[in-house]
Structure formats: C-alpha cells, structure tokens
C-alpha cells in the first residue's frame, strides 16, 4: 500500500520569492516503497531537484496542495471512498464500453482512463477515474485497483479483468462485461418497474382510505348520532375506527413502529431470509418472475466467466453473490463441494426444484459436449425472453387485483356511510 502523504520543505528560497506547493508521487530508491506528499518549491524544476536529493524516483510532480485539493477530507482513503460512491452502475457500464473501444483501437490504458475522466458527466466521477489511473501508472494491476472498490465494481468485473490480464485480451473482456452489466441493469429496472406499480397503487389506496376516515367521515357525525342505536353494524364499526384513528394515535403509532422494527429485524435473521427468499420462488404471481431473474443472473454469469477461462470453483463463488437468494446459496455451496471432488455439475442442479428441468438437461448436454459456455449463453437468452413475459404477466395480473382490492375497500366504506341515509329515507316515506 502507498505510504502516507509527506510534506517536505525545499531549500530556503531567495528573499521575496513566491513559494508554491507541489504534490508528488515517487518511489524510494531503497525498497521501492511508494511515497506521496507535498513539497514546497519556487517552480517545477526546483521541486524535482529537491525530491531527487532526497533519493526518490519521481513518478509525478503537479502544482497544488494535496490537502487543499481534497478540502476537509485529508484522509486519502476517505476521499477515495467518497469519490467511488459517485460512480453509479450506469457509469460503470459506460466506463467499460468506452475503455473497450479505445483499447481496441490501440489507445494505451492510461490514456484511455484519462480520456474517460475528461469526458465524465460529473466531476467526482472524473476524479475517481484519475485515482485509478494514478494507481495503474504506479505499476499496480488494473484488476487489483478495481478490486479495492467492491461496492462500485462487481466481482464479475474484477474476475474478468484478472482473466484478461492473464490472456492479454483486456479490450475484449471489457466489451463482454459491459454487455453483461447492461443486460443486468436492464433486468433490474424491469423488476423494479414491475414492483413499483403495485407499490404506488397500495400507497394511493392507503392515503385515500386515511383521508376518508380522518377528514370525511367525521362530517357525517351529527347524522350518525341522530340515529343512535339504529345505526347499521358496518356504520358503527366505521365510526369507531374513524374515532380511533383520530384519537388513538398514542396506541397505534407505537404498535406500527414496533411492528416495522420487528419485521426489519426478522427479515435479517436466518429464518426471515429463508422465508422471504422461499416466498420469492413460490409466490403465485411474482414467483415465475423471480425464478426467471435468478436463472438469467447465474446462467449469463457462468457463460461469461467460463468463456473467459475463469476456474469453475471461482465461478461458483461469484454466482453465490450474483443470485442473492439463500436457497441458491445452498445450491452453490453444494456445487462447490462436489466440484472440488471432481464431480459433474448437472446432477447437483437436478437436486434443486427451482432450477428448470430443461436448463438442467442443457447443462448436462453442454458438459458432455464441452460446449457449456455456449449452452449457458443460450439458456440465458431464453431466460431473458421468459423474464420479459413474466414481468408483463405479473404486471397485467397485479393491476386488476389492486384495482378490485381498492374498489372493494373504498366501496365498502362508501356503503357503510350511505346506509344510514338510506334508512332515514325509508323512515321518511309516507306510510
């Protein structure tokens, strides 16, 4: 790891001369330790001479105070973490795509990184890419630099970069991972879009019912009180609930908060995670959508990594993070153990019912023919089409269910409010 930043004064300048601060990166001639810091000098040449006197092999000397350039964040690691958070998944996709194109046309990696930094849509993204460039220029592997930021660069990207550095096909691998990340991003947006509609509908229903119960229903209070015990049972229940919502907040608000906190804690326990993940796989409407999603994730990931020559055991470990379901985690754990014993992978997939039988058959065929990457790529393409159908089907089924549910609740409230009026009109008719 680089040494901490050091500030070294230069030789005393002539009287009245303007001394400036220069940020430098260098290596010690003894041991090769990386050193970063600030030196005070009149000009660039003076700064270089002073650093050479100190026995440093200079990598770069730039005008500017290191502390001033980072503002209040004097901790370099803190600065790196803040800048890395500015790089979103769409930025990572663009990063891989543009680097792939530039490397394919013969642009050196350092120049490609600088070009991307100059064209970055946001300043923090550009500064972050320049930090990556500085580390690469100092002799670190590109994959090792990316691996420092697991929250920004996914594991599959790092693994492919390691394979690319070993094979010399960095441009090809960057293009492949950009394509895969773009697909994953599209899939995630599909799922979020499908889940967003029912969430909005539910929120609107809760808001509408709350407004009716808290603000509208009390306006009918005098009418309801005039009928006394003759109020219908649904209306009595509605009046009681309205009064409770307006005056009993000291009871139900803590209960709701406690229930929300308990649910938040429960879903993070082993039992909660297993229950939620099982529901994702078995729900009647959303289950097919989630099963297709997991199939797309692991089949496309395995196809890409196998084609890149990544060891199968490492691929299984990456897929464990990609699927994000504890029941699939059990699959990957079992598979890793059997691969280490030299067994085939198709029988393991066959033991888990949430993996489609046709996919298991394709995996078995691919193993025997030696074309497992091609087979998995075909399975991923078919699963993407099935996912599109599942998302549309889930959305089309959830919409009428939510509408019927909202209509039933609001209609029930309206009926309970109007029943006393109908009763009064009956009593007022001449006999």
Image (cartoon, rainbow, N blue to C red):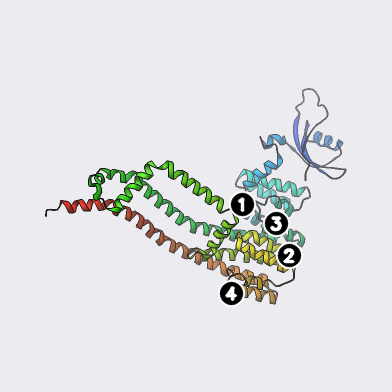
Please say if the residues under marks 1 and 2 sit with CB atoms less than 8 Å apart: no
Q: Label 1 crowding class (10 Å Cα cut-off): few <14, some 14-19, many 20+?
A: some
Q: Is residue 42 above or below residue 291?
A: above
Labelled pair 4, 2 in contact (Cβ < 8 Å) = no
| Residue labelled with disc 1 | 91
* Numbered disc 2: secondary structure: loop
The disc, 3 or 4, on the residue closer to the chain's N-terminal end is 3
Q: Which of 318 and 351 is in front in this view?
A: 351
Farthest top residue in view:
15
First in sequence: mark 2 vs mark 3: 3
Task: Give me the C-alpha separation between circle 1 and circle 4.
Answer: 36 Å
- Is the residue marked by circle 4 packed among few (<14), some (14-19), or many (20+) residues within 10 Å? few
Q: Earlier in the sequence, mark 1 or mark 2?
A: 1
Whichever of callouts 4 and 2 sits on the residue coming sooner in the sequence is: 2
Marks 1 and 4, the one that precedes in the sequence: 1
CA–CA distance between discs 3 and 4?
Answer: 31 Å
Q: Nearer the viewer, residue 284 or 363?
A: 284
Would residue 112 be found to the left or right of residue 190 on screen?
right
Mark 2 to mark 3 CA distance (whole Å) = 14 Å
- Number of marks in picture: 4
Residue 148 image position (x, y, % from top left): 71, 50
What residue sits right under mark 4 in the picture? 358
* Quarter of the rendering occupied by the C terminus: bottom left
Query: Where does label 3 land, which residue?
Result: 158
């Amino acid at each position: 790891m680089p040494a901490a930043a050091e500030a070294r004064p230069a030789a005393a300048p002539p009287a009245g001369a303007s001394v400036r601060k220069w940020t430098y990166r260098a290596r010690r001639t003894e041991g090769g330790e990386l050193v970063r810091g600030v030196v005070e000098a009149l000009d660039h040449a003076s700064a270089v001479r002073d650093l050479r006197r100190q026995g440093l092999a200079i990598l770069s000397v730039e005008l500017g105070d290191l502390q001033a350039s980072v503002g209040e964040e004097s901790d370099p690691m803190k600065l790196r973490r803040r800048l890395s958070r500015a790089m979103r998944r769409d930025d990572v996709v663009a990063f891989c795509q543009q680097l792939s194109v530039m490397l394919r046309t013969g642009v050196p990696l350092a120049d490609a990184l600088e070009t991307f930094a100059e064209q970055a849509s946001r300043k923090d993204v550009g500064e972050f890419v320049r930090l990556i460039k500085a580390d690469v220029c100092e002799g670190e592997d590109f994959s090792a630099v990316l691996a420092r930021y697991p929250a920004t660069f996914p594991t599959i990207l790092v693994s492919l970069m390691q394979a690319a550095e070993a094979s010399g096909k960095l441009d090809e691998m960057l293009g492949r991972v950009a394509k895969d990340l773009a697909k994953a991003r599209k899939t995630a947006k599909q799922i979020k879009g499908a889940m967003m509609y029912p969430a909005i509908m539910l929120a609107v229903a809760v808001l509408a019912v709350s407004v009716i119960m808290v603000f509208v229903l009390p306006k009918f209070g005098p009418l309801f009180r005039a009928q006394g015990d003759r109020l219908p049972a649904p209306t009595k229940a509605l009046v009681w609930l309205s009064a409770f919502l307006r005056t009993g907040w000291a009871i139900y608000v803590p209960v709701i908060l406690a229930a929300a906190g308990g649910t938040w804690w429960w879903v993070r326990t082993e039992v909660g995670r297993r229950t939620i993940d099982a529901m994702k796989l078995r729900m009647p409407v959303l289950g097919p959508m989630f099963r297709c999603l997991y199939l797309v994730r692991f089949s496309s990931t395995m196809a890409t990594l196998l084609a890149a020559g990544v060891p199968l055991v490492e691929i299984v470990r990456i897929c464990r993070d990609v699927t994000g379901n504890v029941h699939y985690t059990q699959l990957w754990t079992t598979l890793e153990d059997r691969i280490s014993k030299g067994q085939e992978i198709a029988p393991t997939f066959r033991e888990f019912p949430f993996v489609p039988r046709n996919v298991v058959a394709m995996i078995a065929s691919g193993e025997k023919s030696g074309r497992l990457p091609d087979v998995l790529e075909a399975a991923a393409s078919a699963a993407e089409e099935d996912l599109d159908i599942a998302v549309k089907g889930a959305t089309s089924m959830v919409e009428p269910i939510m509408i019927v549910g909202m209509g039933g609740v609001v209609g029930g409230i309206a009926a309970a409010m109007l029943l006393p009026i109908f009763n009064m009109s009956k009593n007022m008719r001449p006999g």
